[in-house]
Image: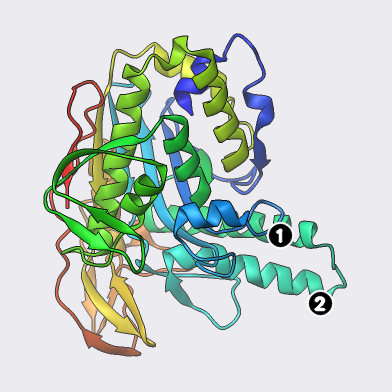
């Protein structure tokens, strides 16, 4: 998206083509001193912005079921920190099953962070229907706006940092991006096969994936040693590979490819209000190849709550992790534990959350997860990172 904006910056037509969202809110906190925090939301839906099911030929390529599959889960959440100095960009992946407090959703006090989008969307749509609204397009758009706002709020509460901008991309967007690039280069540590769920079936080593294979690559979690955490590394590697290909494929000098990428961006991406993408990329272009680092937020342990597999997380530890990654002051106070609940220090107080979210409905405790080694986002070398 950034490369496309740069290439079309003189045309003035790139920014006008995006669907915009006011989900962050005018009164939301923002970063100071020129820093920028951007939330990337990967929405696992098989429907378009008006709630219509994607065409059959597209669904067949996605290998992801029909429009009733997947719901509206935010299966990819990546918080990107760009400092004012632009010397180092840090992208932090948030595991989708992190169990967090939620508000404004009847019947729920906690949920997986990926579910906040769909649960809040359904709540708002039900409220509108009860008031007599029947227009499907209005219901879909209002519901999605509520889902975006709930996701932004959940990430802000979990990480303790402002969200200045966000971009939402649909499941089909991953496919369309890979198609516009003519496929994506990836590298696997070992062969994988998951024909039942994601459609992934790849040998070990470096290889070029077509669009359908690329989507299977970022969706697979079954059959991987660390499940969702390995999938998180896949997503990080995919983004690194895409960035490297954009830099090396002559995109800026190929009007046809540039036009295809712009069409992909406009069709699949929703941007927060007030984000001038062209100006943003011009500013980034003044930086001399900043270092890019991918991290994954820590998980305290796996658990099962109310029949659902969840990640139990320690919010205080996550906020310390974020502060260290973003070059912010690291809190020195420590949590104090009372019984099964963890109370955060006063500096991290919140109306909706506590340090380590644990409830009395726990049915079993599973092994401590292994987040694995960080994926290095080296977009200037000729190699893509190898992952599970």
- Res 200 visible: yes
- Res 329 visible: no
Among the 4 quarters of the image, the one containing residue 209: top left
Q: Is residue 167 above or below residue 316?
A: above
Farthest-out residue, right:
132
Residue with the mark numbered 2: 130
Residue at left 31%, top 79%?
358
Q: Is residue 73 above or below residue 250?
A: below
Q: Nearer the viewer, residue 327 or 266?
A: 266
Q: Nearer the viewer, residue 156 or 125?
A: 125
Check contact, mark 1 vs mark 2: CB within 8 A.
no
Residue 96 is situated, as x and y percent measured from the top left of the image, at 37, 62
Specify whether 119 is left or right of 207.
right
Among the 4 quarters of the image, the one containing residue 314: bottom left
Residue 41 is situated, as x and y percent measured from the top left of the image, at 47, 49
Q: Nearer the viewer, residue 271 or 255?
A: 255
Q: Dot 1: few (<14), some (14–19), or many (≥20) neighbours within 10 Å?
A: many
Colour mapping used in the image: rainbow
Residue with the mark numbered 1: 140
């Amino acid at each position: 998206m950034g490369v496309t904006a740069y290439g079309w910056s003189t045309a003035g037509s790139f920014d006008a083509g995006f669907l915009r969202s006011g989900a962050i809110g005018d009164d939301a906190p923002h970063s100071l001193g020129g820093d920028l925090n951007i939330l990337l939301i990967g929405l696992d839906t098989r429907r378009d912005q008006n709630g219509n099911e994607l065409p059959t030929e597209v669904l067949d390529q996605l290998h992801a079921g029909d429009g009733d599959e997947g719901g509206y889960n935010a299966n990819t959440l990546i918080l990107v920190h760009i400092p004012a100095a632009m010397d180092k960009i840090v992208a932090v992946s948030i595991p989708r099953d992190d169990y967090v407090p939620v508000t404004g959703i009847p019947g729920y006090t906690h949920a997986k962070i990926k579910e906040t989008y769909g649960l809040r969307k359904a709540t708002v749509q039900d409220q509108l229907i009860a008031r007599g609204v029947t227009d499907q397009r209005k219901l879909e758009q209002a519901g999605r706006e509520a889902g975006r706002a709930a996701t932004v709020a959940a990430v802000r509460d979990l990480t303790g940092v402002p969200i200045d901008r966000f971009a939402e991309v649909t499941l089909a967007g991953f496919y369309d991006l890979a198609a516009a690039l003519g496929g994506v280069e990836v590298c696997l540590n070992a062969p994988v096969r998951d024909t039942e769920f994601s459609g992934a079936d790849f040998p070990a080593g470096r290889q070029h994936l077509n669009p359908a294979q690329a989507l299977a690559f970022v969706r697979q979690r079954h059959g991987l040693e660390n499940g969702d955490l390995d999938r998180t590394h896949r997503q990080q590697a995919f983004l690194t590979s895409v960035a490297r290909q954009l830099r090396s494929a002559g995109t800026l000098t190929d009007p046809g490819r540039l036009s295809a990428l712009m069409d992909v961006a406009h069709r699949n991406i929703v941007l927060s209000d007030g984000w001038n993408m062209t100006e943003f990329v011009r500013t980034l272009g003044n930086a001399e190849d900043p270092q890019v680092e991918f991290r994954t937020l820590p998980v305290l342990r796996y658990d099962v709550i109310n029949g659902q597999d969840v990640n139990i997380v320690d919010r205080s530890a996550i906020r310390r992790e974020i502060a260290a990654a973003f070059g912010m002051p690291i809190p020195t106070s420590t949590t104090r534990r009372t019984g099964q609940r963890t109370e955060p220090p006063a500096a991290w107080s919140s109306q909706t959350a506590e340090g380590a979210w644990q409830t009395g409905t726990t049915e079993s405790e599973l092994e401590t997860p292994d987040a694995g080694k960080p994926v290095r986002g080296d977009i200037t070398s000729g190699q893509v990172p190898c992952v599970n």
